[in-house]
Image (cartoon, helix red, strand yellow):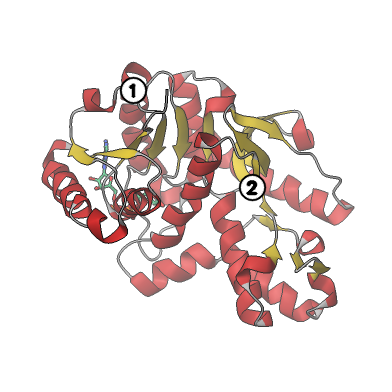
Amino acid sequence: MPKRYKIAVIGGGQVGGITALMIAQRELGDAVVFDIPEKEGLAKGKTLDMMEMTPHYGTDVNLEGTSDFSQLKGSDVVIITAGVPRKPGMTREDLLNVNLKIITSVAENIKKHCPDAFNIVITNPLDAMIYAFYKLTGFPKNRVVGMAGALDTGRYRSFVAMETGYSVEDISAIVMGGHGPTMVPLPRLTTVGGIPLTEILPKEKIDAIVERTREAGTEIVKLLADGSAYFSPAASVLGMVESYLKDKKRIIPCSSFCEGEYGVNGYFIGVPTVIGAGGVEKILEIKLTPDEKEALKNTLEAVKKAVADTRL
Ligand code: APR
């Protein structure tokens, strides 16, 4: 029987609100936006406003705001954006203690009300929050994934498009590793219309793009002065949701739980991940050069440190 999917968005702030907006624009499913009781009006107001927007898109979706976790029952996908965003001068790690408390409460409630959903964590510091959510829920690894690589790769692709002047659509790339300055963009595997990027741009330009990508989140934080990016994080999670619901089996760089892949054991780290109806269906292992391996080792150290800070 045909069915309408139900998507829970936890946190109705900037990222959560825009995620719900994009779900409605693409008619991916009905969305329930959850926020704390003090912000229930915000969640209800935003979703009602979006319902009143749907005639302009011609999309038939139901959107609701709530501060009652039991309203999330039966969700196919849960997207977690609850948490405090980064302010200028703050690293993602500075956020850890505040957001760990929030993730703990979210994990308890999702376990209770949505035990069968596919869960995508966006809250920062992502490398630690995804680990905490996994440990606290005890969900199987195929149903817990972090959104970071999709965002970092999207940023990298847009910088390549800006530099080359060619369509962003034709730029294929992958950024691996943790979600922070140690991330590992891979120019060797970047193509523009099938042509290696290394044949299109000189090394200095590529190095500058890699560096800008590593600091892209911080660049936005500095400009906004009162929060962190929200349009691109919301857009990045949509591809993951769609690949799951439509069993597209897209290969998306995601923060996935590794058990031996790339020599990583027991940590979530950004790796090329196949997302389909089974959730995280497969991690693709590619052969890395010695330099790339070294960079991955370095980013794993940063991930381990963030995870250690959770004391989980
Ligand atoms: N349960 C649910 N929602 C919560 C909770 C909780 N326990 N605690 C806080 N929230 C809500 C806030 O009330 C707020 O509406 O999370 C929302 C966060 O929204 P913003 O402050 O606008 O932050 P946003 O920019 O959306 O970023 C959210 O995503 O990209 C990451 O680093 C970012 O960790 C941050 C998260």
Q: Amino acid at mark 2?
A: Pro
Tell me if I can see residue 229 in this picture: no
Q: Secondary structure at mark 1?
A: loop
Q: Can you tell which quarter of the image residue 11 is in?
A: top left
For residue 206, which quarter of the picture? bottom right
Name which residue lies at 36% across and 50% down.
Answer: 19
Q: Amino acid at mark 1?
A: Gly
Q: Quadrant of the N terminus?
A: top left
Question: Is residue 148 left or right of 65 when viewed as pictured?
Answer: right
Image location (x, y in percent) of residue 135: 49, 23
Q: Position of residue 66 (x, y in %)?
A: 18, 36
Q: Is residue 294 above or below residue 185?
A: above
- Number of residues whose C-alpha sits closer than 10 Å to that of mark 1, classed few (under 14), some (14–19) or many (20 or more): some
Sequence-earlier tag: 2 or 1: 1
Which residue occupies 64% across, 55% down?
Answer: 182
Residue in the foreground of this view, choosing between 79 and 298: 79
Residue placed under numbered mark 2 in the picture: 253
| Mark 1 lies on residue | 74
